[in-house]
Image: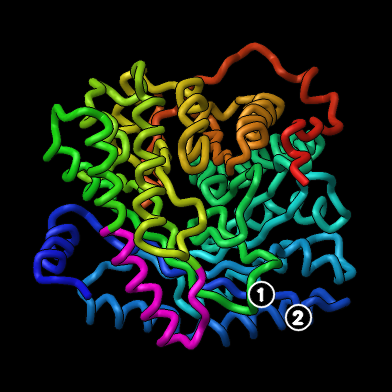
Amino acid sequence: MLNQKEILSTIEMIAQQHLDIRTITMGISLLDCADPSAERACGKIYDKVTRCAENLVSVGEDIEREFGIPIVNKRISVTPVALIAAASATDNYAPFADALDRAAFATGVNFIGGFSALAHKGMSRADEILIRSIPEALSHTERVCASVNVGSTRAGINMDAVRLMGEIITQTARADADRDGLACAKLVVFCNAVEDNPFMAGAFHGVGETDKVINVGVSGPGVVRHAIEAVRGAPLDALAETVKKTAFRVTRVGQLVAQEASRRLDTPFGIVDLSLAPTPAVGDSVARILEEMGLEVCGTHGTTAALALLNDAVKKGGVMASSSVGGLSGAFIPVSEDEGMIAAAKSGTLCIDKLEAMTCVCSVGLDMIAVPGDTPPETIAAIIADEAAIGMINQKTTAVRLLPAPGRNVGDMIELGGLLGSAPVMPVHRESSADFIRRGGRIPAPLHSLRN
């Protein structure tokens, strides 16, 4: 039971320190929607999603009112569509994205994820069709998110899929050029993708999950920064203990909401994802947490060490609070969604190379980074390959969400709106990686993958 002091502390976290439930995400299996007719399959998908999630938004709003806890997003994740569409006789999977988009509008959710392919060891015909359908699918829908897993510690890196994703990201940006390539904000390339991630754009419902499930993502950068301010000047081990205790309290809030949503929706509770997911709002920044630790500007020397401490302490605190911590759980470092990251990038202190180093110890990877619109597809593929290599070797999830901004150059700002924020266009290396990427094939799995 919570005592009075804990209740008052939680109220303060919500009222003054930007604590919120970032998302309630319902995962829905579509395995029973496969059909030789693409039209019938799309109809089955729409019917199942709208039936399962018809009360998701209203229940979330009821919990918000009754508990006084902001729930920013209500979302849906589905089985990777390439697995379902493989049964259909069609060469274009964009209609499946249209069905998902219509279902998202009908249920009122913010986003629906799962227009996805798992291509870490090779691409099936269905995987390739889905991937090549992404530019059309994302530029013609509002709420559909896509992801492709191109590598894993056990399988290595599928460089043919990496090369193709460099081309697809470029095509997706051009297909949505009138919005600065905004569609790319709904597309993630993974290594070691997880099956229970509630956060977009990379959420999908894994094949090992039950028919439907409730996963909750909690976010509290402002709460963590406030806690660190109270131990200013203390040794780093004391700081880590403070973060751990704070993460414990935040996770307990997420567990409470998740269990209540599970009960009201008559849907099994899956996991709480405790990820410090920032927003463009002042006071809700991961970069400012790192600066509160003693860095003058995020991106300077010491940033990777500070982020490693933060990420580890968050995970330890979350595991203490719940036996169902999962997803990505840690610290996100999306540039456009974090006002401190934006400021550090504009000052030139934070560059893509430093962000890549930070991804070795953060929760995900290179996230929401705007690059010049004329960046070659091979360069984008090479950035994906570098990030996938970090994930493969270190047995962690890594991801890339790049935003090539058509017609924009280094130093320009692109406005994405809402939680997606704004981003300065950051420089990439102009020296070519094309010959390396064109080799294709597969980077073999590391020796330590043989753990049986």
Q: x, y (%) of residue 292?
A: 21, 31
Badge 1 amino acid:
Ser
Q: Which residue is mark 2?
A: 32
> SS for tag 2?
helix
At x 34% / y 73%, what residue is drawn? Answer: 257
* Dominant SS type (magenta): helix
Q: Is residue 262 magenta?
A: yes
Residue 296's mark? none
> Is 329 displayed left or right of 152 in the figure?
left
Q: Is residue 209 or residue 188 the one in the foreground? A: 209
Quarter location, residue 89: bottom right
Q: x, y (%) of residue 229?
A: 14, 38
Q: Are marks 2 and 1 in contact (CB under 8 Å)?
A: yes
Work out whether residue 141 can be spotted: no
The stretch of residues the image draws in magenta is 249-270
> SS for tag 1?
loop
Q: Which residue is mark 1?
A: 29
At x 55% / y 66%, what residue is drawn? Answer: 112
Relative to 159, say whether 323 is above or below.
Answer: below
